Image: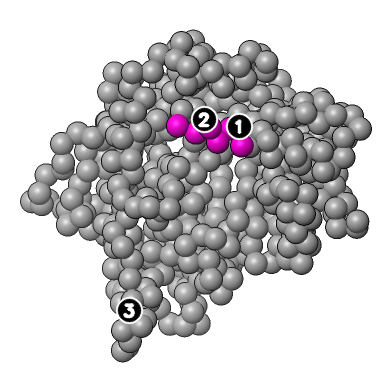
Amino acid sequence: MLQISVEDSEIGPGEAHRWHLVPLTGADGPTPRRMTGYNQAKHFTVAQYAQSVDDPIRSYVAASFELPGQVDLDALAAALLDLVRRHEVLRAVYQPLAGDLGCEVLAPDAVALKHDYCGPLETSAQVTRHLQAAFQEVDTLSWPLITMGAVVRPESTTVWFSCDHLVTDGLSTAIAINDIATAYRNLTAVEPTPATATADAAPQPGSYLEFSRTQRRANRAMRADDARLDHWRAFRDRNGGLFPRFPLDLGVRAGELYAPVTSTEQLLSARQIEEFGTACRALGGRLSMGLLASLALALREQGGPPVYRGLMPFNERGRGVYAESMGWFINTLPVEFPVGPRAGFGEVLAAAQDAYAEVQNHVAVHFVKAWKLLAPVEYASLRYWPHAVNFFSYIDCRRLPGADRHAAQQARMHVWVSACNGILHWLHRTDEGLFVNTIHADTPQATAVNRALLDGFARVLTEPLAT
């Protein structure tokens, strides 16, 4: 699954269709009020405040994929509805509480889809504009938080959906693609065999809201002096705050946001990333930590500090009942390790590996909880990151649900923000190799830094392959 902006996706023209999620009148009422996740509560209150000062920051997490042949629109609509009925986080109606967020969940049979035919899109440029507008319709403060559609051609159909971050994360995107494609395949199978039915059977996913309730209960009694916050507290003191600064000058002014520049490029071929992983294992490290070490070395070569400090996302789903659940199952934790002026790849990899092992001891404490307790003034006042933040993200898309079909489906994830004040790199591996999707502030300095950093990063990545 490639992460790429919709503007760069080159989706062909066709007939545009939309499906809007609507509640059914006369159906059973919503469930009693439920508690939401830490990420959701902060995201919603930020959106509320931004709206109150007429300074909204919009974003979406969207996806598109291809269905071959002539589409069955009724079956596609049923598959899209099945997605919403499978994942209750998509059926939740969110309501602000005093400094928090609750929700009520509509029953699976209390929602339906309303179909709209939007007419022909005669060029790829028209398709792009149509999708840009449709993707941006999702709004943190409005229900529903998912919108869905398709661009239909005689020989194939592009299926798409867009969610507000409130109800999704990057891994949810692959889960949703797999759920829709599996349901559609089952609905249109002429004579499904028992083997096919067994392979495509999708167990009922666990509830993200139930996960959130359990997580909140585990941290309910936590106070600012709790020993479980020692790791965060020590990092804050060494770093000078909870948010590690991106260590290179991007030419951004404090307190200002800028239009985003997005791009996706390939860093390593499939053969090269496989060889890189082999080199990392020979040195006793993980491939992901080899990528982090290489990025830290590239930052040092561009004038960065001798200690790498950054935030790293961690997937909280595990391998049990939540493995294929939609929701915002992401914690964010700090990682730091030395990058000495003469340290080579092997030494920095070992340091990164040790730092990762240390971070894993603290995954039970959620970033939002630590933020609220250790920096309460900043927590209450910040609507976005206080400065350009150093952030490392890597995902092996080959391990995601339905990954064996990603290439044939041309599965794509589209991430967008209306404004930013720094630089973000999302590293992801597909069957074709290693890619990076970048969003950075639109300044000449940020553009130059990003280019130099990615060139240096690619060079550092290939150095272990030459030995």
In this rendering, is residue 129 above or below 191? above
Foreground: 86 or 54? 86
Q: Earlier in the sequence, mark 3 or mark 1?
A: 3
Residue type at mark 3 is Ala
Q: Position of residue 441 (x, y in %)?
A: 69, 34
Whether residue 436 is visible, yes or no, is no
Image quadrant for the N terminus?
A: bottom right
Residue type at mark 1 is Glu
Name the residue tied to disc 3.
197
Residue at horizontal 53%, vertical 32%?
361
**Colour scheme:** one colour
Q: Position of residue 430 (x, y in %)?
A: 64, 62
Foreground: 115 or 391? 391
Foreground: 49 or 315? 315
Magenta part of the chain: 357-364
Q: Badge 1 local density, few (<14 within 10 Å), some, or many (20+)?
A: some
Mark 1 in CB contact with mark 2 (< 8 angstroms): yes
Q: Distance of mark 1 from mark 2, alpha carbons?
A: 8 Å
Does dot 3 land on a helix, a strand or a loop? Answer: helix
Q: Is residue 295 left or right of residue 452?
A: left
Residue at horizontal 38%, vertical 65%?
180
Q: Position of residue 181 (x, y in %)?
A: 41, 69
In this rendering, is residue 98 above or below 439? above
Residue at horizontal 77%, vertical 54%?
282
Q: Nearer the viewer, mark 3 or mark 1?
A: 1
Q: Distance of mark 3 from mark 1, alpha carbons?
A: 43 Å
Q: Which mark is residue 362?
A: 2
Does dot 2 land on a helix, a strand or a loop? Answer: loop
Is residue 358 rendered magenta in the image?
yes
Q: Position of residue 459 (x, y in %)?
A: 87, 50
